[in-house]
Image (spheres, grey):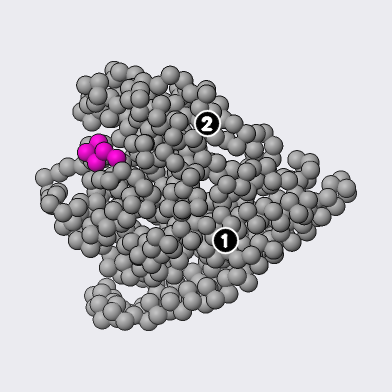
Amino acid sequence: MSASTTPHDLWQQLRVTFPDDALLEQAKAYSTAYLQQVNEQRVFPDDAALSALDHFDEDVPQGVGDAQAILRSLNDYGAPATSVHVGGRYFGFVNGGILPIGLAARWLSDAWDQNAGLHLTSPIAAKLEQISEKWVVDLLGLPTGTAMGVVTGTSTATLCGLVAGRNALLKRQGWDVNTQGLFGAPPIRVVMGAHAHGTVKRALALIGMGHGTAEIVPVDEQGRMDPDQLPELDEHTLLILQAGNVNSGAFDDFVTLCQRANEAGAWVHIDGAFGLWAAASPSKKHLTAGIDLADFWSVDGHKTLNTPYDCGLVLCKDRAALAAAMQASGDYIHYSDERDNMLYTMDMSRQARGVSLWATLKFLGREGVAGLIDRLCEHATLFGQELQGAGFRVLNEMVFNQVIVACDQPAVTQATLKHIQASGECWCGGSRWFGEPVIRISVCNWMTRPEDIQRSVAAFVKAREDALRDIANL
Ligand SMILES: *Cc1c(COP(=O)(O)O)cnc(C)c1O
């Protein structure tokens, strides 16, 4: 746009070019070029790429810019500063990859720019979340009729779940949190394992239940809650379990724990961010036996299922309890007889996340979902075995997609991790496992192949050599 372009000209010009804007073609070309070379790119950016991010430091631009140039700067300075989540050698945190169908569906639904809150604002978003709900409940073997909402991630899903559980437990005691608030409410107990995820604690804090007041159940050497040390439960208790320990990938004993909770009338929440998907694999299903006895499940699409980001699932056995907790009303909100997505989440306006979720499930099907889960688990086991062969210690039972690795000395482990992260060959995070510093591997991307694991193991070995040399030179 030239300096003489008037605002009127701008909107007129955009109207004309929008349908087949060269910008969209350019975005596709940049994306394709990125994906074509991504397995050659460093897995984490080097210092030069990080310093170049200074390019973005500027004050608020005064006038209308040049869209092509904006997109070009994103490509030129942004792409090299990505950590390569779409490639096969990123094993940090529990970050899933992205399937082509999910990416394509996201592009298309972004062009639709739907507000997925109501059936009235987007019939297609309502339809695809309704279908996805039915499919997810079936794939995970949850009770028929379980309600599902699509949120940004498990952090938010857990928040929704604990609100629903808290409110349901108080309602049974004749207390309506929505109108009466929490001050003066009858007490509610929270029981959770010593390895409950940080997002569970944050959710408890956010909803005014202070995680410091929770009764903590000790865990075994894999991080599983010890059922023998479960306190007496009652109908005022929120029991929080875990499908997939964030370090070891271990699963709580749901059959025993949920039965105890059901007998006592407690509410059971399962944080299954990545592990709940074990239920969709015939070879891993045994890990999740008993999950159907819970009341609420929080799980991600963007981890194990490899959907695009911003896909967390809220799953509640009692549809009315979820809708009551997420209550939203206003004279201008017209609920329909069809599904209204905003009944099941805290959002009103939001993107149509269910579109890429639906497309991913439709593409994979039951067999594809199981195949994906098995592939991740097999590669994690291979990674652990290869590392053991190279003299590293594996500290967990490799039941799912997580491997906890250490060297002979804590200082060597820490220095090795630094060298791995600096190598650009692969990327793993660090953690502590019963006090010991460890390297944490999560195989969570369909893209990972055995070759990627071999190359990563070589990077581990080289990093340990460098670490030992550093220490010897101290
Ligand atoms: C990742 C994770 C979470 C948080 O999920 P987000 O999608 O990152 O919000 C919660 N619990 C466990 C066990 C996780 O692995």
Residue indicated by mark 2: 225
Q: Is residue 71 above or below residue 315?
A: below
Q: Main secondary structure of the magenta part?
A: helix
Earlier sequence position, callout 2 versus callout 1: 1
Identify the residue under disc 1: 83
Q: Position of residue 8 (x, y in %)?
A: 23, 75
Extent of the magenta region: 317-321
Direction from residue 262 to residue 377 in the image, left or right: right
Q: CA distance from mark 2 to mark 1?
A: 34 Å
Tell me the kind of residue under disc 2. Met
In this rendering, does residue 66 appear at all?
Answer: no
For label 2, the crowd category at 10 Å Cα-Cα, with few meaning under 14, some 14 to 19 and many 20 or more, is many
For the residue pair 100 and 260, the one nearer the viewer reads as 260
Give the residue type at disc 1. Answer: Ser
Residue at figure coordinates x 40%, y 74% from the top left: 67
Quadrant containing the N terminus is bottom left
Q: Residues within 10 Å of mark 1 (few under 14, many from 20)?
A: some
